[in-house]
Image (cartoon, rainbow, N blue to C red):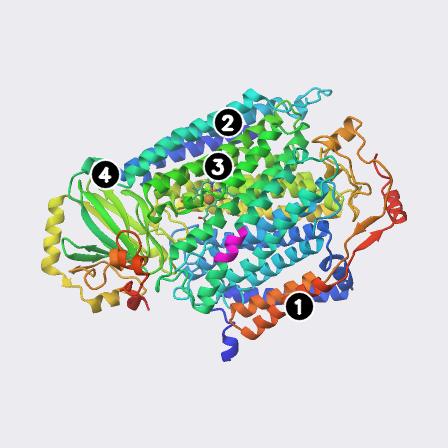
Amino acid sequence: MGYFSRFAVPHPSPAIYASMIAIAVTVFLIIAGITYFKKWIYLWDGWITTVDHKKIGIMYLISALLMLFRGGVDALMMRAQLAVPDNKLLDSQHYNEVFSTHGVIMVLFMAMPYIMGLMNFVVPLQIGARDVAFPRLNAVSFWLFFMGAMLFNLSFVIGGSPDAGWSSYFPLAGNEFSPHVGTNYYMISIQIAGIGTLMTGINFLTTILKMRAPGMTLMRMPMFTWASLTTCIIIIFAFPVLTIALLMGTMDRLFATKFFTITDGGMDMLWANLFWVWGHPEVYILILPAFGLFSEIIPTFSRRNIYGYTSMVASMVLISFYSFLVWTHHFFTMGQTAYVNSIFSITTMIIAIPTGIKIFNWLFTMWRGRIRFTVPMLYCLAFIPLFTIGGVTGVMLAMSAADYQYHNTMFLVAHFHNVIIPGVVFAVLGASTYYWPKMFGFVLNEKIGKLAFWFLVIGFCLAFFPMYITGLDGQARRMYTYSEDTGFGPWNMVATIGAVCMAISFVLIVYMIYYSIRNAKKEAVSDPWDARNLEWATHTPVPEYNFAIIPQVNSREAFWDAKYKGHPLFKGDYEKIHMPNNSGVPFLMSLFFFALGFGLVFSMWYLAICGLIGVFICMAHRSFEQDHGRYISVEEIKETEAKYGGTHK
Amino acid sequence: MKTKWALFVVHFLIAFVLIGCDKIAVLDPKGPQAQTQANVIWLSIGIMSVIVVVVCAILVFVLVKYRDSKLPKDYEPPYIEGNRVVETIIVIVPILIVAFFSVVTIITNNKVEATPQAYKGQDPLIVYASSSNWKWHFSYPEENIETVNYLYIPTNRPLEFKLYSFGPITSFWIPQLGGQKYAMSDMVTTLHLAADEAGEMMGRNANFSGVGFAENSFYVEAMSQDDFDDWVTEVKETAEPLTEEKFQQLLKPGHLGQLTFTGTHLPFSPAPEGEHAGHNHGKDGPKADTNGNQEHDVHEHDTSTS
Ligand code: HEM
Ligand SMILES: [Cu+2]
């Protein structure tokens, strides 16, 4: 008993037992199903060992949707608990676990992979490349993210979830105040996923800089590629800070170091600083690609080129630079002087300038355009006013004297959901609808899509606008309940109704996918939206080599020019194409990482050491492996292209 | 149809907000600092609403005018690179707004970080407010009394709160008197407040600090200096002294009601300032800086939290 008792959840509830059973049943059903349908080999050859950026992208998207579901259930539980005063649905400990996992999952295991998935799928196509610079590394990135997410979710049923918030401030997150393993899970699973993200950053930076089609100069790159480039730069500078902070936190928890402790000269403020030195750039890592996606969708459905290309690029570069100069605005109230607060207050407001410029550029892109109200476009149209509200409340928070009143309240919660949901979530949902035909060969149902959209937008407004008011009225964030006489009750009820609308929207989205799979015409159109950039110049479904002939670019919208101005995109003849081989090592290596992580969480050193050795063996194997890839012959290309009806020229 | 609905919702919301406003704590200040902050909030809401309205107006205009169904069949949108004048305007206007706000933020920061203007020159009441899981201890060193979970303060006199914590980071917040500030275990932070009128208020820890966080609030009452002095005298006559042993008991995690003592915990458990600070650097701690010896940096509360 003694050995296994460490795996027990310290604060169990019926929900947790139910989940244990549900997880066991699901795992069993999945394994049985795959075996019954004899899909193991298909899974292994087609997906688990793949190094194809398109498949990796799709795996990211599927995982992100699953995590959206998990995070969404967390959100519903919180809203149910707060709906009425003095509610007893969840107790304090459970509520704390729920908001902590909600935050981590939504930011790191939903929004990040969703964006990574879209980057994976779109960027190489958009720059006319055949894959990313380091395809094998790309697979490692994905599997590390995946195992990090799995490890984190495991905490729910084995050992207990983290409960110190997604920002996990020390000393609260230290051993003294968080004795159970929840926070170990936090430190280690984010670490594992974070290593993957850092590698993605390096990979895509290299890809964008080195693998663009001939003629595509930096200032001819599509907006999403520019956004990804700036994002990668932020990732490369920000994630190492997180790595170190988590390492220090892990050492404090596992090896009794004193970086952030109350005693022996530890400094709790150091964690807050390190966390936000990563954390603020992180929010721009989320929003810049989202900006890029809006900048793809809006021109397409306005039938116009993007307005103010140069200022769009300039503002993204500025944002990526400034995002490192504002972190202190997350703790204006830590006791630094008025002088320090003034500086960070001003740098923070300065970031709003390039953001504002982008909003006006999107508006002017639609001006004199020809606007079609498709589902992806609707998300963009709702994004503009709602994100503006989120942005201006950001500027309000940036006024540090007033932030003393907003900080740690529902007002702040309203702000960041007001930028993240209309900003990031609308972007990825719009973009998934937009790129769906390129990924799967058919268009999603418009009617259900629009219904889901309206539920989401109205639900969002109902759920988050009341928080601005209760925040100003003194409702602190992260309180598991409040009393009747505070008067927060009615507002919170409205917010809960809004959350339910958003949940309905999610269900509708799932239904839309199901319905479209069954009913949509699978006509495999390669350019269903009459779009403007190179990703639409390939066939649908995209052949594994993306482009039979690498496109020639001589303007910002080469594909548009090819369609309407007679610009020849594909010149020359087929040549054999060099492609990377599949490999199971990334998956294997991530399994070792998982073992390492699990071992560390429970201080089971033998397991951790075995895992670590496994990781090193995988790396050594890669160093000595002779793998020069393979070639697709000209005959094979001709055959494939013929099936698609030839290469457009 | 849709517009009608939208209009209805907007009207409804505006009405709702206007009715609720004068009762909203932060916008119903009872002291000069909260007043300053409320002014900043109203000012920024005002200017920011203009921005939101402008953006929405342009959006609606564009959507109405350039929607596919309203345009002639043969209309083909032009290729527009950009326009110097327009782009200059959308850069300059935000810069001007931010410049204006920068001035406001500098002025107001200096206001909230100092003794309120109206009460300058007066002798401030100093209160050491320390948090432990999940309580607030208020020590009045000059009056030599201590309370738990409630705070009596005189009106029309500057208040200087010295904040620190016996555990996780907490944040001391009385919305109607002024914004919050962190209380941490290794240093003392100072919050300058004052109350203009007598009355009861809510105060709480705003920073998440574990299981008992939601109930980590305290009662605040502002009263005239005379009433305050009477209260102090009464406490001195009736309350029990705070012993070290008793204080250790109080620090144990949990919730307590409102308690009153004579004496404070400061003599036997000094606040982490000066030579007692966790990171004894700068002017106050020459010893720690010159020889790097941290040995005297003993936190008195180490013993209490373990
Ligand atoms: C338009 C410019 C923006 C400004 C001026 C701004 C300003 C701020 C400020 C001052 C805070 C700290 C408030 C406090 O803790 O008291 C904050 C918090 C936050 N912001 Fe923004 N923000 C902006 C845009 C964004 C964007 C685009 C995102 C994400 C996509 C974002 C996500 C967040 C998050 C997640 C937090 C709080 C995290 C937490 O404490 O848990 N913000 N913002
Ligand atoms: Cu920030």
Residue projecting furthest to the front:
B290
The question of residue B5 being in magenta is answered with no
Mark 1, other Cα within 10 Å: few <14 / some 14–19 / many ≥20: some
**What separation in Å lies between label 4 and label 1 (alpha carbons)?**
65 Å
Secondary structure under the numbered disc 1 in the rendered image: helix
Q: Position of residue B46 (x, y in %)?
A: 39, 29
**Magenta-colored span:** A239-245
Which residue is under mark 2? Answer: B91
Q: Main secondary structure of the magenta part?
A: helix
Residue A564 found in image quarter: top right
Q: Between tags 4 and 2, which lies in front? A: 2
| Residue A35 in the figure: left or right of residue A287 | right
Q: Which mark is residue A351?
A: 3
Q: Position of residue A266 (x, y in %)?
A: 38, 61
Q: Chain of mark 4?
A: B
- Of residue B276 and residue A228, the one placed in the foreground of this image is B276
Which of disc 3 and disc 1 is earlier in sequence?
3
